[in-house]
Amino acid sequence: MESPVLGDGYAGFGRRSGETDRSQDRHRAPGRPYALVNRFQFVCDHADTFGVKRLCQVLGLNRASYHKWRDGAQARAAREAADQALAEQIRTVHADLDGTYGSPRITAELREQGMTINEKRVARVMRKFAIVGLRLRRRVRTTILEPSATPVPDLFKRDFTATEPGCKYLGDITYLPLGDGEFLYLATVLDCFSRRLVGWSIADHMRTDLVADALRMAAATRGGLTDSIFHSDHGAQYTSKDYAVLCHALGVTQSMGAVGTSADNAACESFHASLKRETLQGERHYGDAATCRRTVFRWLTRYNTRRRHSANGQLSPTAYERLHEERSARVSLAA
């Protein structure tokens, strides 16, 4: 009789040891459906009938390796149970955040809940149980240049950091696809210090009013923008005369990156990519305009208070600013 695992070797248990080479070679060959662990398990299941020594000979296994594997069964079972328990905790966090977090942010969430755990283990368990975040979608260009616009210098030079909140801001426009082939457009204003969203506006157009409304909201959120710098691309909305007048009235100095270079506004590009990745979740559009507005509004309002940011040491923007305020207060008291 021929075994599906042992092949010809099972029928030849009475052969001399030298006659098992062909069977051993077959089971060592790449692409065989039975991995090493499966063969160890087969030996364990049939050891009482055929004996460990003979089974290992036929299957081309090292007996010492088999015994080491068998002796570690209890520890493996404990690890598997621990992995399954961790996977359930990860799934809970993952689902609570709409399935958007990868291993770094999930690790931070678990640590905040009191767990002592490293990111490597979280990443391994996520791979093992197929728990994945969301991937970036292809970006559609929304920057429309104004040929007659007055040149504005780049004051950022790709430095999107700040030592204090309220000093450096950046903004951009992104499209929000609808089911009927039309779009809504979102303009945002981010604080470079904490990546906090301080201003935003959604409309069915890309006129200057769109970006102006976002900047006005930022001024209201911060209680003013005097002596701050606002960085953007060279879109016609940002280079318009009306926008320049608004910036002057608010005490804002404009800064713009090079034409056609998204890296000069990379932080805002990344923000918009995360928003669409986590709200669309693989879909091609948001449905109708009302659904789009609700979905994006929900994400934007949660972003500042809940979404962990790698630039903030996995703290949310508001938590990062609060920590900064507490540290500044302690320094002032010490002085």
Image: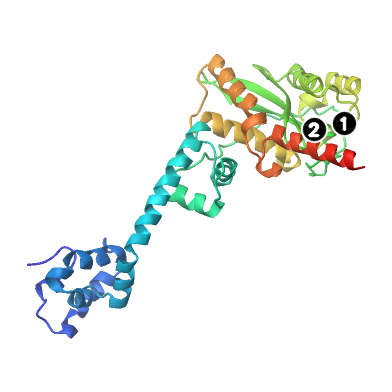
Q: What residue is drawn where x is 88% and y is 39%?
A: 333
- 132 left or right of 313 in image: left
Q: CA distance from mark 1 to mark 2?
A: 7 Å
Up the image or down, 147 lies above or below 15; here it is above
Up the image or down, 225 lies above or below 8; here it is above
List the residue tagged with mark 2: 169
- Type of the residue with mark 1: Ser
The part of the image, by quadrant, that contains residue 49 is: bottom left
- 302 left or right of 331 in image: left
Q: What residue is drawn where x is 11% and y is 81%?
A: 15
Image x and y of residue 119, in percent: 56, 51
Up the image or down, 218 lies above or below 17; here it is above
Image x and y of residue 120, in percent: 53, 54
The quadrant of the image that shows the N terminus is bottom left
The part of the image, by quadrant, that contains residue 207 is: top right
- Type of the residue with mark 2: Tyr
- Pointer 1 local density, CA inside 10 Å: few below 14, some 14–19, many at least 20: some
Q: Nearer the viewer, residue 211 or 305?
A: 305
List the residue tagged with mark 1: 228
Q: Are marks 1 and 2 in contact (CB under 8 Å)?
A: yes
Q: What residue is drawn where x is 45% and y is 43%?
A: 131
Q: Nearer the viewer, residue 303 or 216?
A: 303
- Pointer 2 local density, CA inside 10 Å: few below 14, some 14–19, many at least 20: many
Image x and y of residue 164, in percent: 83, 37
